[in-house]
Image: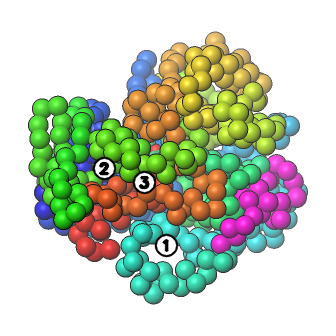
Amino acid sequence: MRVGIIGAGLAGLAAAARLAASGHEVTVFEQGSSPGGKAATESGAGYRFDTGPSLLTMPEVFDELFAFAGRQREDYLSFLPLNEICRYFFADTSQLSAYHDQQSFSAELQRVLGESPAALERYLRYCGRLNRIAGELFMRNSLHEFSTYTKPRILKSVLQLGRLDLFRSMDQAHHAFFNDPRTIQLFNRYATYNGSSPFKVPATLNIIPAVEYLGGAYAVAGGIHALPCAIETLCRELGVMFKYRTPVRSIMTEEAGGGRRVIGLQTESEEFRADVVISNLDVIGTYRDLLRDTEAPLYKRYQKLEPSSSGMVFLLGIGESFPQLSHHNIFFSADYPAEFRALFEDLRCPDDPTVYVNVGCRSTPADAPEGKENWFVLLNAPRDAGQDWKAERARMRGAVLTRLSSALGREIEPLIEYESGFDPPDIEKNTGAAFGSLYGISSNTKLAAFLRHPNRSRRYKGLYLCGGSAHPGGGMPLAVLSGAIVAGLVTGAT
Ligand SMILES: Cc1cc2nc3c(=O)[nH]c(=O)nc-3n(C[C@H](O)[C@H](O)[C@H](O)COP(=O)(O)OP(=O)(O)OC[C@H]3O[C@@H](n4cnc5c(N)ncnc54)[C@H](O)[C@@H]3O)c2cc1C
């Protein structure tokens, strides 16, 4: 089969590798000049930054991709397991390290927050159970194909859906497990891993801490951008053709048996005929810009669904080293509910934001000059709704520098040797993510998991969708799994 893939994001790359390994003729069209989409990179003044994802989970998903093609991921790139997953700095100046090793983490929670080891054990057992029931069903299968529900393991999961803790919010569940508001804030943070609010998202999403604490968190040697580059290398070895700086202008379709089917895609310079077209771009952009079909029921549905939150990023080359920082660091706000009201209800950046600082050179020392550090600073930001982003950035820059200077006991501004960054509209412009949302639609409703766009289009025969805005959602491993689901559907293996 001749396959055209739009977008070299992680999902598009994963679908390309699997389909090429299955013997299909695959061409990837990418508007940018390198692979990775949101997992991009930027350099300047001797510093290098990953500009998108910084934390890798579910390494097995990437290993499976290479294994599918008969290769070993270790021959292409190294994952570095983190024992200290994240260092937390609370508003009251207390500090805590979250470890992969459960005993060490338990001891920290008891020492700093007075939580009993039994509470953490109970909680992680509960998260692990949610993951066992729902993980395979939601993450590794299309929810929209009859064949999914004929698999015995899936049927077992479906029969247990009542145990998915769908009716409490994540925050309510955490109140039932822990006593200290700081512990609750720490675990509530996992709702932001898919751009949602812990006060609205169903407790089912406590699958996320299971993935991180039980499965582990990883850095990538050479930085996260090395990951899409490695998958691209694999693709090329399998015969995939890449056309960079080649935006797709439309998906071509024709009438077929009372419906429509795709016949290829169009760029500025060519008409590319294909049996199958896979869109790795945002669902909204796929319908609005490439199919010009704003009457499609699923397009209309996506117009009504709440987008996930976005991010505001500051890339800072810091001319000094801060041993009090770990690889991943969170500086929490004092009032988490107010932060999420600002993000999802007022659609403005919170006055007192939670600040995430990733020090990439902890795992890739060459990314900063000796004795200096490359800080990737990320704030949760509302989706783009026409806010004055210049003003928001200036306000948030002040908030970030005040918070970090006070927590680290040192004026940060004079240490900045390199600075750049981006806002939600830039994320939309650079990657096509509608409203700059990082993870497609939010999971702030109970049914969100079922409302994401199916991986196979029913409206256009031969059209498939993968990536963070389609099923199963955003985040690197899920994007790669959506590519795997699509490849399985195309080859009839799913
Ligand atoms: C700041 C930030 C932090 C994040 N942190 C994490 C994290 O720590 N861990 C994690 O797992 N995930 C994280 N994520 C989310 C993760 O990056 C994404 O979910 C994942 O990379 C999305 O992959 P995707 O396949 O959906 O494609 P995308 O990365 O969205 O790529 C889509 C591609 O399509 C291309 N494209 C769009 N339109 C066209 C067109 N018309 N023609 C040709 N090409 C086109 C774009 O240029 C882009 O390359 C983060 C994201 C951001 C932005």
* Dot 2 alpha-carbon crowd within 10 angstroms: few under 14, some 14 to 19, many 20 or more: many
The colouring scheme, among rainbow, by chain, secondary structure or one colour, is rainbow
Q: Nearer the viewer, mark 3 or mark 1?
A: 3
The image quadrant of residue 175 is bottom right
Question: Which residue was labeled with disc 1?
Answer: 136
The residue depicted at 61 percent of the width and 81 percent of the height is: 160
Point out the tag, 2 or 1, that comes first from the N-terminus: 1
Q: Amino acid at mark 2?
A: Ser
**How far apart are the alpha carbons under marks 3 and 2?**
18 Å
Is the C-beta separation of discs 2 and 1 under 8 Å? Answer: no
**How far apart are the alpha carbons under marks 2 and 1?**
24 Å
* Dot 1 alpha-carbon crowd within 10 angstroms: few under 14, some 14 to 19, many 20 or more: few
The residue depicted at 52 percent of the width and 18 percent of the height is: 419
Determine the residue located farthest toward the top in the rendered image.
414
Residue 16: tell me if it is visible. no
Point out the tag, 3 or 2, that comes first from the N-terminus: 2
Nearest the eye: 304 or 248: 304
Nearest the eye: 311 or 169: 169
Classify mark 3: helix, strand or loop. Answer: helix
Nearest the eye: 323 or 144: 144
Point out the tag, 3 or 1, that comes first from the N-terminus: 1
Determine the residue located farthest toward the bottom in the rendered image.
152
Q: Amino acid at mark 3?
A: Pro
Question: Which residue was labeled with disc 3?
Answer: 297
Left or right of 238? Residue 493 is: right
Question: Which residue was labeled with disc 2?
Answer: 279
Classify mark 1: helix, strand or loop. Answer: helix
Numbered range of the magenta stretch: 164-184
Residue 104, horizontal then vertical, whole percent? 72, 60
Q: Nearer the viewer, mark 2 or mark 1?
A: 2
